[in-house]
Image: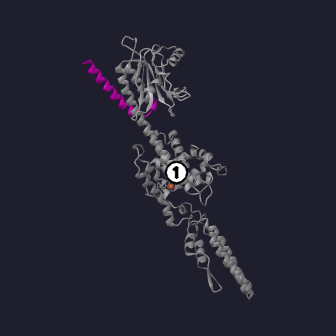
């Protein structure tokens, strides 16, 4: 009856430990819990948990606990301790130490008296005892093995006590219980390693995709990496803020989610054609067509010169000269507006149309300056992209959302697609791809949006624009705040925390870093 009660108690204890172990996220606490339970089971004075080193050649001290010596060391303390080698120089197994002996035999073992046994060489134990003024007597050690019978580590216990307080030996029952405990620990440890391994794999995979997207075009190298860094920095500043964000505290999982969202925000660019993504001039398709256009101007100019030579009247010569001068002017004009740096006023558009309809006849052949398609591109009012190309460019946020929504995440990352794919949304509902409004845009989405914007404005590797100075960048952002597009509090935090400068010192060119009059910037939206 007593035996049965004891058995039930043990089963209950093991179940409780199993549940506790699988819930413990911190690996140090996890092993501490295992060792404490092992000590409680056996009423031992102390014990050590060793884990197999990464190269599998040694046992690493992980947790050490000895009641009588008031010794309680965790992984941070034992990290510097020399490991216990499992093999000698020639690759022979070392049985010198009890833990290595059990690691090699793979069998739970116990000895009544470490000084009087012939199982293992006790010189290591003796050394330990004399240095620490301790006396090891009874010992037990159990290997921790995973489901494939691979060794993960060893639990070793020292000096079991009986109810009268005398050192006694570890019993068969102790070994059975410890074996169950070790296998529970091994399962939980393996699971933890698997989960960690999967998360590591996810991170590595995401980073390699991000690197591939960044490398796809010659201009945007490093954009994603910098957006991820800045998102992390912003989240960190929010954590530390004692003002407007004093009530915001991200968990480590939420911080990880923000970082991942930063890394994945432009994943949809994988489908954006390079000629659209990197279209730096209006006439660029696979190459910039400006050279072809210039050739046409030069050809017609040469024809005019020839006609000047053969003209019979001075009046005709003058007229042709004037035409040639105008032509050269028009060519300069086209070279200028091709860059997309200028807003195309109505008179510019008219001039392009005139150039399009110009024709010159020579040798009974008609020569033109620009084609219909070139006219269309040159008439782009802002930037270098045609409406359909802009649409293609914007599509990347939608594709990001679709791609990320397809994946199955751990529950803790369930908002990742939203955070990542809403970086082009505007608080006033005028962004893309979903025209989300302020109420639908959580802080995390706004963080990625600000990081994306600040990086894009300051980057010096974008088509048709140099990296802006800090003042220029913050001014633009201030106007966007004024227009209700981006989060005012976050922009202020970026400035007040001096993060804008910290980022600049790390990533921008010295000539971009100017003295910013923060009050003047704030004045833009506070007016
Ligand atoms: Fe984007
Ligand atoms: Fe981006």
What's the residue at 38%, 19% (across, down)? Answer: 42
9 in the magenta segment: yes
162, 246: nearer the viewer: 162
Q: Hey, which residue is sitting farthest left in the picture? A: 1
Q: Is residue 275 visible?
A: yes
Question: Does residue 12 appear to the left or right of 513 in the view shown?
Answer: left
Q: Is residue 33 visible?
A: no
Question: Does residue 65 appear to the left or right of 361 in the view shown?
Answer: left
Residue 258 to residue 435: above or below: above
180 in the magenta segment: no
User: Considering the numbered disc 1 on the image, is that residue within a helix, a strand or a loop?
Assistant: helix
Query: Residue 106: x, y in percent?
Result: 42, 27
Query: Residue 408: x, y in percent?
Result: 40, 48
Query: Residue 396: x, y in percent?
Result: 48, 58
Q: Residue at label 1?
A: 210
180, 200: nearer the viewer: 180
Residue 469 to residue 144: above or below: below
Residue 88 to residue 467: above or below: above
Question: Does residue 440 appear to the left or right of 450 in the view shown?
Answer: left
Label 1 CB sits under 8 Å from any ligand 2 atom: no
484, 115: nearer the viewer: 115
Magenta portion: prevailing SS class: helix
270, 427: nearer the viewer: 270
Q: Residues within 10 Å of mark 1 (few under 14, many from 20)?
A: many
Residue 197 to residue 218: above or below: above
Query: Residue 426: x, y in percent?
Result: 48, 55
Quadrant of the image for the N terminus?
Answer: top left
Coloring scheme used: one colour
Find the magenta span and give its range. Answer: 1-28
């Amino acid at each position: 009856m007593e035996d049965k009660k004891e058995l039930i108690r043990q089963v209950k204890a093991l179940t409780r430990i199993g549940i506790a172990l699988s819930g413990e996220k911190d690996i140090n606490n996890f092993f501490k819990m295992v060792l404490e339970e092992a000590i409680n089971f056996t009423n031992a004075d102390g014990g050590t948990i060793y884990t197999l080193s990464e190269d599998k050649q040694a046992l690493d001290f992980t947790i050490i606990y000895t009641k009588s010596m008031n010794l309680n060391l965790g992984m941070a303390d034992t990290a510097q301790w020399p490991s216990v080698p499992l093999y000698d120089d020639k690759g022979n197994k070392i049985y010198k130490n009890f833990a290595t002996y059990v690691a090699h035999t793979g069998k739970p073992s116990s000895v009544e008296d470490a000084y009087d046994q012939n199982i293992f060489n006790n010189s290591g134990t003796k050394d330990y005892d004399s240095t620490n003024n301790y006396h090891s007597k009874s010992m037990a050690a159990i290997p921790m093995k995973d489901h494939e019978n691979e060794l993960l580590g060893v639990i070793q216990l020292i000096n079991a006590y009986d109810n009268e307080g005398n050192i006694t030996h570890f019993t068969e029952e102790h070994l059975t219980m410890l074996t169950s405990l070790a296998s529970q620990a091994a399962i939980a440890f393996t699971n933890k390693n698997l989960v960690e391994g999967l998360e590591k794999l996810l991170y590595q995979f995401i980073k390699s995709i991000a690197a591939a997207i960044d490398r796809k075009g010659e201009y945007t190298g490093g954009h994603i990496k910098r957006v991820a860094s800045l998102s992390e920095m912003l989240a960190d500043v929010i954590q530390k803020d004692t003002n407007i964000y004093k009530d915001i505290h991200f968990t480590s999982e939420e911080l990880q989610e923000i970082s991942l969202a930063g890394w994945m925000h432009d994943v949809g660019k994988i489908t954006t054609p390079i000629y659209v993504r990197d279209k730096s001039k209006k006439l660029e398709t696979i190459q910039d067509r400006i050279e072809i256009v210039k050739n046409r101007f030069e050809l017609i100019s040469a024809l005019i010169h020839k006609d000047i030579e053969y003209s019979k009247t001075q009046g005709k010569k003058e007229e042709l000269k004037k035409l040639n001068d105008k032509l050269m002017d028009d060519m300069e004009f086209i070279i200028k507006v091709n860059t997309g740096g200028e807003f195309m006023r109505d008179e510019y558009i008219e001039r392009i149309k005139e150039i399009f309809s110009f024709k010159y006849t020579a040798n009974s052949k008609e020569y033109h300056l620009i084609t219909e398609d070139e006219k269309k591109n040159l008439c782009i009012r802002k930037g270098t992209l045609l409406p359909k190309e802009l649409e293609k460019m914007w599509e990347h946020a939608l594709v990001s959302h679709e791609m990320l929504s397809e994946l199955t995440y751990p529950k803790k990352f369930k908002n990742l697609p939203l955070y990542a794919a809403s970086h082009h949304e505007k608080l006033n509902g005028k962004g893309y791809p979903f025209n989300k409004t302020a109420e639908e845009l959580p802080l995390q989405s706004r963080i990625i949006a600000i990081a994306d914007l600040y990086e894009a404005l300051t980057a010096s590797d974008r088509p048709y624009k140099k990296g802006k100075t800090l003042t220029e960048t913050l001014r633009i952002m201030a106007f966007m705040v004024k227009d209700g597009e981006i989060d005012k509090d976050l922009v202020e935090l970026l400035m007040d925390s001096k993060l804008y400068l910290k980022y600049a010192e790390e990533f921008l060119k010295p000539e971009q870093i100017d003295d910013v009059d923060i009050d003047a910037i704030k004045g833009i939206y506070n007016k």
